[in-house]
Amino acid sequence: MNTHIDARDRLIVALDVPSAAEAERLVDRMGDQVRFVKVGLELYTVAGPDIVRILVDRGKRVFLDLKFLDIEETVRRATARVAAMGATFLTVHANRKALLAAVQGRGQSNLKLLAVTVLTNFDGEDLRDMGIQRSVRDLVTARAQLAAQVGCDGVVASGEEPAAIRATVGPGLIIVTPGVRPAGTGTDDHARATTPTQTIAAGADYLVIGRPIRDADDPALATAAILAEMQTAFDRRIG
């Protein structure tokens, strides 16, 4: 069985830009080495479903990061609309009713649902401010278990948690990790940032990277360096 992982399939570049035109320019500058992109709240707010369709038509896989959380009927219907756009991943907050509604809404489509466990800018003090007394790791693993139970395909978690998720839930759940920063760069507003090597060694499947590529003088060169580090880490993990 071929167990090779191509890093180009596992890097998700966050298109955190304020217009569709800028998103397309960034995609152009990165070139064919990027196959998977993330559309988040900023870009979706200004460009809407059209940007998803444009990117899909350009042959890109799209991670639509809208973090749905609403009453069941709203989540169910909205998820069905996302599935019709051709997106590959969609995020939903790890609330049982919202997750179940999203599973129903995606129907028989190929849309994969990711439960958001704990945002990467949160730490234990943030959880306590919300009235949650559990540690970040305990809450992440509990929400990963919930995601698996209700039929989600994966979770979004920081690079500090994949090992704990794997120990609790097993190998079948997709783990997507944002807040990944190449060594020597800042963590920005991520409280639990990790490097690509650390993140992959811990067990993550996909890495979401935005500002280190978007803000680079040469996004294509920055992407190539990140892909090289990722490929080495995946090869080492498999070997």
Image (spheres, grey):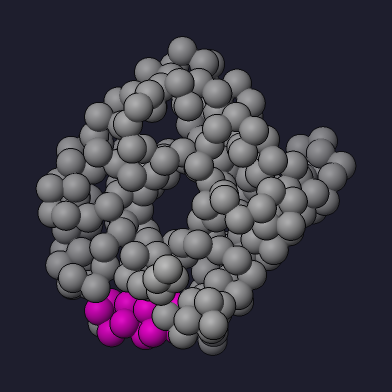
Specify whether residue 175 is painted magenta.
no
Q: Looking at the picture, does residue 208 appear above or below residue 212?
A: above
Task: Tell me: 93 left or right of 3.
Answer: right
Outermost residue to the top: 73
Image coordinates for residue 108, horizontal then vertical, percent: 35, 27
Image coordinates for residue 52, horizontal then vertical, percent: 23, 43
Task: Tell me: 207 left or right of 141.
Answer: left
Q: Nearer the viewer, residue 217 or 4?
A: 4
Instruction: Determine the main secondary structure of the stretch shown in magenta.
Output: helix
The residue located at (39%, 84%) in the rendering is 228
How many circles with numbers are drawn on the protein?
Answer: 0
Task: Tell me: 178 left or right of 140.
Answer: left
Dividing the picture into quadrants, the one containing residue 82 is: top left
The residue located at (62%, 38%) in the rendering is 148
Q: Looking at the picture, does residue 103 appear above or below residue 119?
A: above
Q: Which of 208 and 167 is in front in this view?
A: 167
The residue located at (18%, 70%) in the rendering is 32
The quadrant of the image that shows the C terminus is: bottom right
Image coordinates for residue 23, horizontal then vertical, percent: 22, 57
The residue located at (65%, 61%) in the rendering is 162
Image coordinates for residue 7, horizontal then vertical, percent: 38, 73
Dividing the picture into quadrants, the one containing residue 116 is: top right
Specify whether residue 221 is painted magenta.
yes
Q: Looking at the picture, does residue 74 appear above or below residue 29?
A: above
On the question of residue 172 being in view, the answer is yes
The quadrant of the image that shows the N terminus is: bottom left
Q: Looking at the picture, does residue 223 appear above or below residue 144?
A: below
- The range drawn in magenta is 219-230
